[in-house]
Image (spheres, rainbow, N blue to C red):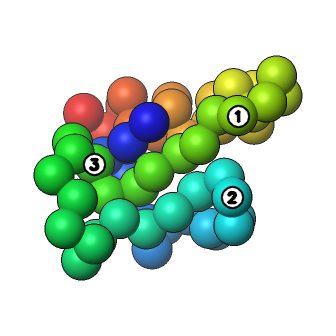
Amino acid sequence: MYLRLGPDTVELEEGFTRDMRGIGHLGTGDLEVRVASAGDPEKAAPLFRRAFVAA
């Protein structure tokens, strides 16, 4: 999923978060968060909250 968070404000983790700026991405946010395992939603929850509060 794509979040409206600045990738510079997040510690990027390969395979979990990705900076989408300058990639020709037409999504809704500059930070991609990959939810691929059962534990990933809990791990991503703080990012989801930050994006929600900033909206």
- In the figure, residue 36 lies in which quadrant? top right
Image coordinates of residue 30 in percent, x first then y, are 31, 58
**Which is nearer the eye, 1 or 5?**
1
**Which is nearer the eye, 35 or 47?**
35
Image coordinates of residue 45 in percent, x first then y, are 64, 30
Labels 3 and 2: the sequence-earlier one: 2
Q: Which residue was labeled with disc 3?
A: 29
- Disc 2 crowd, CA 10 A, few/some/many (<14, 14-19, 20+): few
> What residue sits 70% from the left and 65% below the top?
13
Q: Which residue was labeled with disc 2?
A: 15
| CB-based contact (under 8 Å), mark 2 and mark 1 | yes
Q: Which residue was labeled with disc 1?
A: 36
Q: Quadrant of the N terminus?
A: top left
Relative vertical location of residue 21 with respect to residue 16 in this rendering, above or below: below
Q: Report how far apart the C-alphas of labels 3 and 2 lie in the structure.
A: 17 Å
Secondary structure at badge 1 equals loop
